[in-house]
Image (cartoon, rainbow, N blue to C red):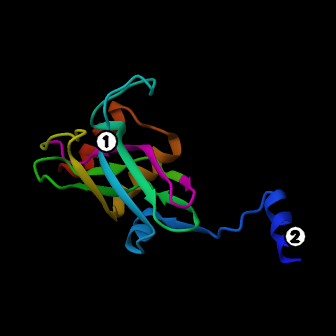
Amino acid sequence: MRKYFLFMLTTMGFSTHAEGVYRLTDAVQKKLVTVSMTGAKSDTAFKGEYSSHYGPCMQMQVSNTSADNLTLNLEYGYQLVPDDSSLQTMIVTQTLIVKLPPKQKKSYRVYAMCSEAHDGGPSPDANFIPRTRATGHLLGLTELLNRKKYQGNAAQNAVWCLTDN
């Protein structure tokens, strides 16, 4: 009877794996995933305005180390801090929600903007770590950029106006 029940669940589109929904930073703390984040390589896969310091300028590789299906959320406003202090802290400007099966590894582009005009931009050799979420006016600005999908040069200048005062 148990085999029949499991067969019915899987044929009806149900999975025997549990599913969890987490903020990316919480999933990392709980050791459900490992994350590697760098500046993105320039390519032709992304149409429109491209820059190394705004838009889809960050590359994130996520590995699900758990036995569960995971839905991960990297919300706008999260600060991506570089290992190298001569590089700019990046700020996520478009929420990314990903579904990751158990024991799988996938790569994603992250929309972000530089938050320190005087420092260098991200490169594919530079490592970044998602830390804390911005607060106040900067969080409000990233909410607007996310909602309206503003990801160009004018939006980048707006971020610098708030962060480089």
Is residue 100 shown in magenta?
yes
| Quadrant position of residue 122 | top left
- When the figure is inspected, residue 11 is found, relative to residue 86, above or below; the finding is below
Q: Which residue is tagged 2?
A: 4
The residue depicted at 41 percent of the width and 22 percent of the height is 44
Q: Where is residue 4 in the image (x, y as percent from the top left)?
A: 87, 70
Which is the main secondary structure of the residues drawn in magenta?
Answer: strand
The nearer-to-camera label among 1 and 2 is 2
The residue range painted magenta reads 98-117
Binning the other alpha carbons within 10 Å of mark 1 as few (below 14), some (14 to 19) or many (20 upward) gives some
Comparing 84 with 70, the one in front is: 70
Q: Residue 45 carries which label?
A: none
Instruction: Indicate which disc, 1 or 2, sits on the residue closer to the N terminus.
Output: 2
Q: Which residue is tagged 1?
A: 158
Residue 163 lies left or right of residue 9; in this view the side is: left
Is residue 70 shown in magenta?
no
Binning the other alpha carbons within 10 Å of mark 2 as few (below 14), some (14 to 19) or many (20 upward) gives few
The residue depicted at 34 percent of the width and 42 percent of the height is 58
Question: Mark 2 is on which residue type?
Answer: Tyr
- When the figure is inspected, residue 146 is found, relative to residue 140, above or below; the finding is above
Comparing 111 with 146, the one in front is: 111
Q: Position of residue 18 (x, y in %)?
A: 64, 70
Give how far apart the Cα atoms at labels 1 and 2 are.
59 Å
Q: Where is residue 100 in the image (x, y as percent from the top left)?
A: 55, 55
- SS category of the residue bearing label 2: helix
Quarter of the rendering occupied by the N terminus: bottom right
Q: Position of residue 16 (x, y in %)?
A: 71, 68
